[in-house]
Image: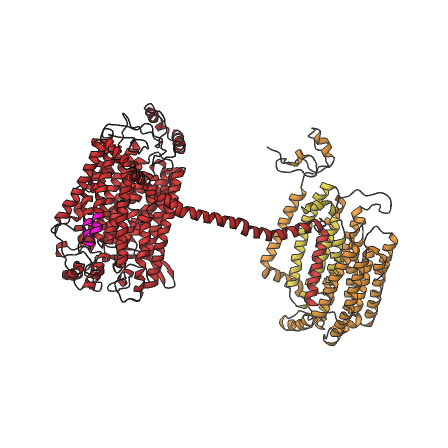
Chain colours: A yellow, B red, C orange
Amino acid sequence: MSELALQHYLAVGAIMFVIGVIGFLTRRNLIVMFLCTELMFQGVAINLIAFGHYHNHLGGQAFVIFVLVIAAAEASLALGLVVLLFRQRATLDADAWRELKG
Amino acid sequence: MQDLWQIEYSFLIPLLPLIGACIAGFFGARLLKGQSHWPIWLGVGTSAVISITLLVAMLGQSHPADHVDASQGVAAAAEIGIGPARDSIEINLSATKNYFPWISIGNFNVNWGYFFDPLTAVMLCVVCGIGFFICVFAAGYMKGEAGYFRFFAYLGLFIFMMTNLVMGENLIMLYLGWEGVGLCSYLLIGYYYDKPAAREAAKKAFLVNRVGDFGFGVGIMLCYLAYGTVSYFGQGAGTNTGLLEMALNPNHEGSWALQYIPFLLMIGAFGKSAQFPLYVWLPDAMEGPTPVSALIHAATMVTAGVYMIARCSTLFLGNDAALWTIAIVGAFTAIFAASIALRQFDLKKVFAYSTVSQLGFMFVGVGVLAPVAGVFHLVTHAFFKALLFLGSGVVMHAMMGELDLRKMSGLKRQLPITRILMLIGCLALAGFPLTSGYWSKDEIVHSAQGRSLLLYVVLSVTAFLTAYYTFRLYFRVFEGPEVIPPAPVGGHGHGVHDAADAHAVASAAAVQTQTEHESGIDEHLATVKHQSAVAHDHGHGHGHHGDHNNEPMIMIIPLVVLAIGALFAGVLNLPTHTFGHKLGHFLGQSPSFSMGYFKAQQANGDVEAALAGAEGHAYIDPIPFGQPGESEFHLLPLIIGGAIAIAGILVAYLFHLQDRARAERLAAGMPGISRTLEAKYWVDEIYQAGIVEPLRSLARAFFLIDRFVVDGLVWAVSFVPMLSGFALKLTTQRGYLQGYAAVMLLGIAVTLMVIFL
Amino acid sequence: MGAGASAGAFVPSGSLAVAHLIMFGPSLEISAAALLSFAPLAPVAAAVLPPVLILVLCVVAGIGTVLLLPSRKEAALRKIGGAVILAAGLILVALLVRAAAGTGGMGVYFWIFAAIALLSALRVITHPKPVYSALYFVLTVFASAGLFVLLWAEFMAVALIIIYAGAILVTYVFVIMLAAEATPTSGPMAGLAEHDAISREPLMACVVGFALMGVLLFVIFEKADGAVGSATPQAAVVVVEGAPPPGSSAIHTFTPEGGVQELGAYLFSSQLVNLELAGLILTVAMIGAIVIARRRVVGTDAATHAIGGNETIVGPATPTDDDPHTIPVYGTENPRQKAYPET
């Protein structure tokens, strides 16, 4: 079997990131939008792990830990906010909050 | 003399008043309140004691006057080891105490150090000694004022700055003190900051002083440029590295600057010491509390210019034009201000113009190369003018702010002690024979006579006018039928003419009094029955009738001390050969003066040639420089001087005591002159129209330019993004979060493409 | 290319995307040639899956994505999209099977995991129901964890599963359940909220996204190969003992006991402060989440009761005995309940 190069992993990460982007852009459900940001995190995490592996450096994994931490923190806070928003408008539609543009 | 303990601990002299000021300023409002004068009393009193012991110690180390002559000086100096033999400078009595390097930028090094010589010692005694008595007086005078602690904090700060000014060993220290006392003057003139006149006067004093200080600052820079140092004298024996020492050397590479430096320094002196073009702030400065007028605007700060010129005499020596300018400006100011004082009706205004006039005398003294005479007059003037101001303070205190001498008369029964003390002060100011003012004024007049007959005539006329207006005031206020002014309208009564405003201030003060000083209310009410209105300047309610003590001891005792000084300070420097010229000989050992004398010798070969005054700047009177030489008793000028003073007093008697209507008739007979004098030659109006208004118009023009051109441009520039932002907001900011994200990502994609493709 | 025809409204954008792809094709062929000629590792990989093929598959998948994204269109169209993507996936699987049949080894797992991860990620964003999205995301997480294992990051793989699939996703599902919206009960969009059923401008988003993807892939395969893929690992072999140089046979003899221990030692020595900071962030986030979420929940119907003067708060069975002086009331239109009490 062919040897796998760093590029393969990077490509997977990039594609996953872009899928997350597309989801973030198209979906209107707040929760799904956050899921899509998690997808982007995933793509980045794959990139970091791959870099760390191919550079023989643990920094990549350490960085992923921090990414996970941030993702967890973000998820907890964001979901709390989503719940609050839902209570206000009884909908998860991001467009319901358009007037926040000021 | 380096080993004197006073010099070792000289830092205490400025530091103690500063500490006192800090204590009064930081803890006065809450803790000390009415006792805020104590830290200042203690600080300034201790400084005064140190200063006086320093003076005594230096007197003890100075050599007896009759032993001094040019040849013996060197030996004497070498024998007692006072000061280095400064390159053939025979006599000096000086020491420098450096504490720490203050400013060090490249080659520009300034030490925080103090320089001691007889001039410093004398000035210190004047500043701290008289300052102490005025502080004592102020505790009585200012009692119950709102901001009592503030007043004393400022006073302490002032003494700190003034002692720095006279003790500094270089021009930068002098400048520090110079600006510092200017600041304190500003703060204290504006002490009654709720009074518009006081605010205006404070601003005026500050701004006019800036004009002078600009020149002074440039002069100091020029000194540094020319000589590479700002220290007066070099450190250590025989080093001619000081500014004043190098100025003596006509071959020094920096001597080109001597054409300009004196004029620049002179501008600063004119501003600080209220000489002709820049005198306008001093009369207005009387808006401050009376002790301030006495301390700052009569006794000490305004003499800083005289001190500075005396200290830097060697810089001025080589420049005849500068000396003539000083003398002429001084003489002109003297007669000019004296003439204005003739038709002033406000006690403090009269004394203010008198101060300007007397400062003119001192400038003539230093201008005709008789700095010792100038300093002598400075000392005596400090005594009697402080006495006069404090005396007017007592009058004002008793009359509750009223100072218009047309509204009062015959107060001798109300204020018996004050009347005697004021009489002493007036005699001294008038130059009545054997008072201190007589001796010092005569010495200046005599020195001027040797320089120019015109100066002599002008000064004599001024002396006559001085005697006249002084006793006009005295006869009006203290003699004649008793007239007590009705309830005053003045807030603090320092020549306030804005009645409505002053009334408001007084009412406010009264209200404040009743809330703050409840103990004073009874006293206050007792006063009210004598008066139709209750507005008065002193919250604690001193009436001028009946059972109230118009002359509290705390205010009288300092006056007595000053009166003694005013009477007998002349013995310091009697113009006699045998036991006179004590001050002259003492001051003559100051390097500033002895080097000036030496320079004159250099220029002329010997003392006699110098005395001949035949050519150029050669005129040097050894007596003013405190040097041995011709010191015979000039009897005739003394008699003439006394006669002039007595004549002035007599005229005042005729017009203002014997028949007061006569004065009115005289004034009515010369309406033009009278009005001109009352309007103070319209100088303020001329300044207003000639300087202030054009500047204001210019500022207005700039304001319009700024408003319409600059702001318009800025507005136009800002309008473009504003408009485009508004358009973008309407078209693109639609609130779709994902739309923003899409644009952002598109931007990232495009950026990456641009970078990598 | 069919996308442009089918979605008439987006023809300009679609054709732009097509032009973009046409532009990209040759350049990636060049890149393949460059890989063939220069990179010692690349030729084999390029032989398995030429980048052009990857790109074409991606484009096909992109078109499928556009079609597959929830929209108002008939289900048939979305089925076409699904078929397209499925076709692309089948092609991929076939290629993989062929490659695996040739040599075997770890490479196969990469392709399998990558395919699962990407397809399920695609499904995350295309499934109209959030719950399914979340579950597909779990699948993505598992596939990513598999990739992590391939990269010898077994600790991270387990952590990913525990944290993401075990914790975060559970929270998501909870919230999805909690925030149940009113949905139509019948019709083509039964059980779907309007904003779930209809996505916003899918073509535009796909154009932007695939433009970005194209750039990224180009950069990854064209610009970065020499620098990262080949040069650095050899140097790393010399430096770090026990760590496998990628692509070498040492990968099989790598002693895995170094992984977790090394990571732990690294984290608690070099990254100690950062680790503590991460813990702090988690704590703060937890407190914040509690503050945000622990409100007194008031039913939306409470407003009608309260405005009439009745102070009784009607709401679900969440705590209502919190101190009213400190806890504001959200979720009601009654201004008296919104404000902080005066006392």
Left or right relative to B342: residue A37: right
Q: Position of residue C159 (x, y in %)?
A: 69, 57
Quadrant of residue C306 within the rendered picture: top right
Q: Residue at x 76, y 50 (%)?
A: A28
Asked whether residue B213 is drawn in magenta, I would say no
Locate residue B187, reporting x and y percent: 37, 43
C77 lies left or right of B347: right
Whether residue B447 is in magenta: the answer is: yes
Residue in the foreground of this view, choosing between C333 and B669: B669
| Vertical position of residue B665 compared to residue A37: above or below | above
| Residue nearest the viewer, comparing C222 with B535 | B535
**Which residue of the protein is positioned furthest toward the right in this rendering?**
C76
User: What range of the chain is rendered magenta?
Assistant: B443-457
Residue B541 appears left or right of B77: right
Viewer can see residue B530: yes
- State the residue in front, B118 or B265: B265
In the rendered image of this protein, does residue C36 appear above or below residue C289?
Answer: below
Query: In this view of the protein, can residue B50 be seen by the observer?
Result: no
x 40%, y 41%: residue: B199
Q: In the image, B608: left or right of C134? A: left
Magenta-drawn stretch, dominant element (helix, strand or loop): helix
The percent coordinates of residue B481 (x first, y second) are: 23, 27
